[in-house]
Amino acid sequence: MNCPLCQQPITNKIDPLYYQCGTCFAYVKDVASYFSSEQEKRHYEFHNNDVNDLGYQKFTSPITNAILERFSADTLGLDFGCGKGPVITKQLVDRGYSVNLYDPYFYPDQSYVNEQYDYIFSCEVFEHFHHPHQEIIHLKSLLKPGGLLLIMTHLYENQKPFDSWYYRKDETHVFIYTRQTFEYIAQQYNFNLLVLTERFIVLESN
């Protein structure tokens, strides 16, 4: 199979479900084990993402705080893959910000593509991308020059053996990133890599 990000052949199968790409260093789930759209939606419907939950607000605060620090309320943002509980959007809208929502299952209105955005954020979304190459190109096309793409996902950094790591056990996590993966993304898709931590990444569009 080919890597869905860098498009290069991958043959290094590291466990029964995952390959490791030798070009972009991502961990890629075997396509044969992907959930169907119906299975994915049922899985996401069980997520308990209460926008008023203080723990959830704290978890998502790296994105919320970065937007509040860098952008004024007269800018426009996009919550891409917001799920059924768009907690970051609620935090921003409560402060007077304008944010559009998109989620293929819960907010499927495609009119979001008619705008250009000062910032786009995706919290716990990138690991679900079946086609990360196309998704990143799409998101970049929606950003204004100098706009920010703010991402929360969990990078694999050899925290423990990959086959026993909690994050790869979620059946809808099909593409796991490393630091090298985001360095590759920044170079190949013409972003400046502003922040790169284990859980939070910020890319600036050139």
Image (cartoon, rainbow, N blue to C red):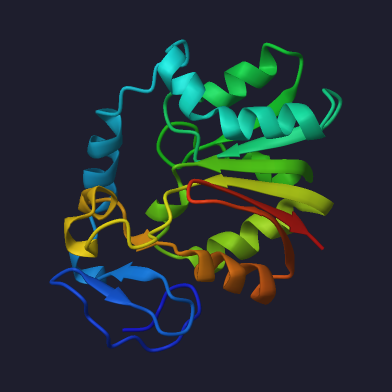
**In x, y percent, where is residue 50?**
40, 16
Which one is nearer the viewer's eye here, 95 or 177? 177
Quarter of the picture containing the N terminus is bottom left
Residue 73 placement: quadrant: top right
**In x, y percent, where is residue 57?**
50, 20
Q: Residue at x 70, y 58 (%)?
A: 140
Which one is nearer the viewer's eye here, 84 or 154? 154
**In x, y percent, where is residue 81?**
49, 41
Q: In this view, does 122 lie above or below 94?
A: below
**In x, y percent, where is residue 157?**
39, 61
Residue 61 placement: quadrant: top right
- The residue furthest front is 159
Quarter of the picture containing the C terminus is bottom right
Is residue 115 visible from the viewing direction of this image?
A: no
Q: In this view, does 188 lie above or below 173?
A: below
Residue 190 placement: quadrant: bottom right
- Tell whether 144 sits left or right of 39: right
